[in-house]
Image (cartoon, helix red, strand yellow):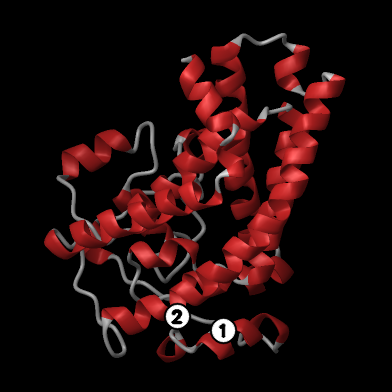
Amino acid sequence: MDRIIEYFSTLEQRPLERMAILVGGLLIFWIIEGAIPLLPMQYKKNKLRHASVNFGFTVIHLIIHTLLAVLIVKLSDWCNQTGFGLVYWFNANLFFTILIGVLALDFSSWLVHFVMHKTALLWRFHLIHHSDNNVDVTTGLRHHPGDSLLRGIFFLLLIFVSGAPMFSVMIYQTLVVLATAFTHANISLPKKLDHTLSYFLISPNMHKVHHHWKQPFTDSNYGAVFSIWDRLFGTFKILDAGKIRYGLDRYYPNEKDEDFVSLLKKPFQKMEP
């Protein structure tokens, strides 16, 4: 356990290693979705062209969160030095320190996601993620810069509340990177396995419901790693995978879901009714 804590305590200082985890997760699920696809994809040109658009947003997302990492480290260290946050107020042991930190940060992912869906101004940025008509492993980090920045703000807020030390922060960030690749990947799991996973984790089918083109399904299943928040707050929904259709029923033309420049500009333009 000490070695695990030591590893994650300094992982923030090894960006190449963190990148390897991200790229490795993408490659693994890229291969798996090619072998056992959930739905047939209808890319505008081909899978690589589709991926290039999403990777463009991924690069911007990573730059923003690399810059925010400085604030994350400083805030986590400040909580440690001042004894501020849930882990210190409860005098949590190592296990509960990890548990509180991971759950608090996962709640930040659920909360910011919920807020973006319920706030018209913020939805303008988040709809770029939902505009993808072919949800696959590369969709996971397809976030407009405004979306990415807001996620970072909520992440900082829950570090402040929980007092999560850096090893807990890095454990969660590793989990969420792998979970994001897993839940967006176009993979077909046995229904019973997917259903069983959804009691504890966000399963692929559970998250695909969130990408269904019509509400109220779009406004459901907001979780990132754990399904507890959707079940607790009544935002959990089920839809047969065969009935899922990706994209949006309004706001943005589906035929332009791979227009990178147009997607960047969209939040600042007049919204279609």
Q: Secondary structure at mark 1?
A: helix
Q: Position of residue 269 (x, y in %)?
A: 70, 88
**Amino acid type, mark 2:** Val
Where is mark 2, residue-wise?
A: 53
- The alpha-carbon separation of the residues under discs 2 and 1 comes to 10 Å
Q: Quadrant of residue 47?
A: bottom left
Query: Residue, x 46% and y 72% (percent of image)?
Result: 55
Can you give x and y, in whole percent of width and height, for residue 100 in the image? Answer: 61, 23
- Tag nearer the camera, 2 or 1: 2
Q: Dots 2 and 1: beta carbons under 8 Å? A: yes
Local packing at callout 1 (Cα closer than 10 Å; few below 14, some 14-19, many 20+) is many
Vertical position of residue 209 compared to residue 42: above or below: above
Tell me, yes or no, if residue 118 can be seen here.
no
Instruction: Tell me which residue sits at (32%, 71%) in the image.
Output: 245
Q: Mark 1 highlights which residue?
A: 263
Vertical comparison of 69 with 30: above or below: above
Mark 2 lies on a secondary structure that is helix
> Residue 237's mark?
none
Residue 270 location in percent, x, y? 70, 89
Q: Is residue 50 left or right of residue 18?
A: left
215 w.r.t. 192: above or below: below
The C terminus lies in quadrant: bottom right
Where on the picture, by quarter, is residue 168? top right
Instruction: Tally the numbered discs.
Output: 2
Q: Amino acid at mark 1?
A: Leu
How crowded pointer 2 is (Cα within 10 Å; few <14, some 14-19, many 20+) is rated as: some
